[in-house]
Amino acid sequence: MSSNSLAFFIGLFGSIHCIGMCGPLAFAIPMAENKWWLVVADKIIYNIGRIVTYSLLGLLIGLIGKQLWIYGLQQGVSLLSGLLIIIAGFTRFFKIHLSGNKWFAALMLPVNKLLSYALRHHSGHFIIGLINGLLPCGFVYLALAGAINTPTPVTSATFMFWFGTGTFPLMLLATVGSGFIGPIVRRRINNVIPYVMVCLGFWFILRGLNLNIPYLSPAKQTSGVSICH
């Protein structure tokens, strides 16, 4: 599986998990028109805004990752990313609640203020989508962990673009269809998510080990630039 395909499927599975948080926000945006095709157009614009923010975050994290590649630290980053993702997966397996509520609230506060300001001033779907992309989200962090393991800022931004594209179909259907995925379905999906996280974590670790296994654990490149599978 290519890195872009991986990013797409992270976004696809993540969108099922995140509909409960992001869907109500999309519903809260005032509608200027009630024609169905204008409603769909507004929701498409909203989701494009999210994808733009994800891509910009990918570019930013890619600039950091590029320095790690230059100094030959990408192997350690891949191993560390995999380990942290596995730990996060196991905390969900065993329902371990880490003491991160204050940290999460601190991240949410400035974004919530921006959203409140944008909603009060009728900033429109695109701007709301841009801000929505900044909301703290475990799947966005998971995607960023994948993006930082790509060799250039462009590939990192591309990784996050495909992540955002993966979130697009279900988020569009949910925002247009008034949240067609019910809480029971989301609960069942949430039970599967830790398995996905652990598998991804092991995949990052295998990549970092450079075992010369095609696609799964490619050999380490000596030229300073390697191809991300």
Image (tube, grey):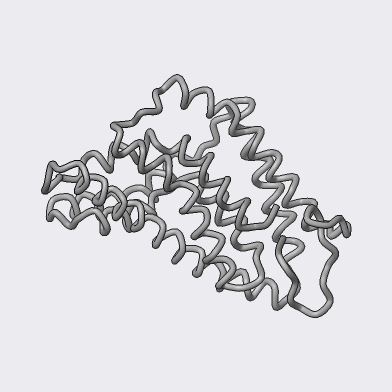
Give the farthest residue toward the top.
184
Q: Judge by depth and name the residue closer to the eye, 17 or 67.
A: 17
Q: Is 95 on the left-hand or right-hand side of 216?
A: left
For image coordinates 64% across by 37% down, the residue present is 196
Q: Judge by depth and name the residue closer to the eye, 187 or 2.
A: 2
Which quadrant does the C terminus fall into? bottom right
Task: Locate residue 135, reporting x and y percent.
Answer: 38, 49
Q: Residue 178 occupies which quadrant of the picture?
A: top left
Up-down: is 149 above or below 187? Answer: below
Q: Is 158 on the left-hand or right-hand side of 130?
A: right
For image coordinates 15% across by 43% down, the residue present is 35
Q: Judge by depth and name the residue closer to the eye, 93 or 110.
A: 93
Task: Locate residue 98, reporting x and y percent.
Answer: 55, 35
Task: Locate residue 53, reporting x and y percent.
Answer: 40, 61
Q: Is 33 on the left-hand or right-hand side of 19?
A: left
Q: Is 99 on the left-hand or right-hand side of 20?
A: right
Please state the total of marks drawn on the protein image: 0
Residue 185 visible in the current orientation: yes
For image coordinates 36% across by 47% down, the residue present is 108
Q: Residue 20 occupies which quadrant of the picture?
A: top left
Residue 90 visible in the current orientation: no
Q: Residue 66 occupies which quadrant of the picture?
A: bottom right
For image coordinates 45% across by 19% down, the residue present is 184
Give the farthest residue toward the right.
212
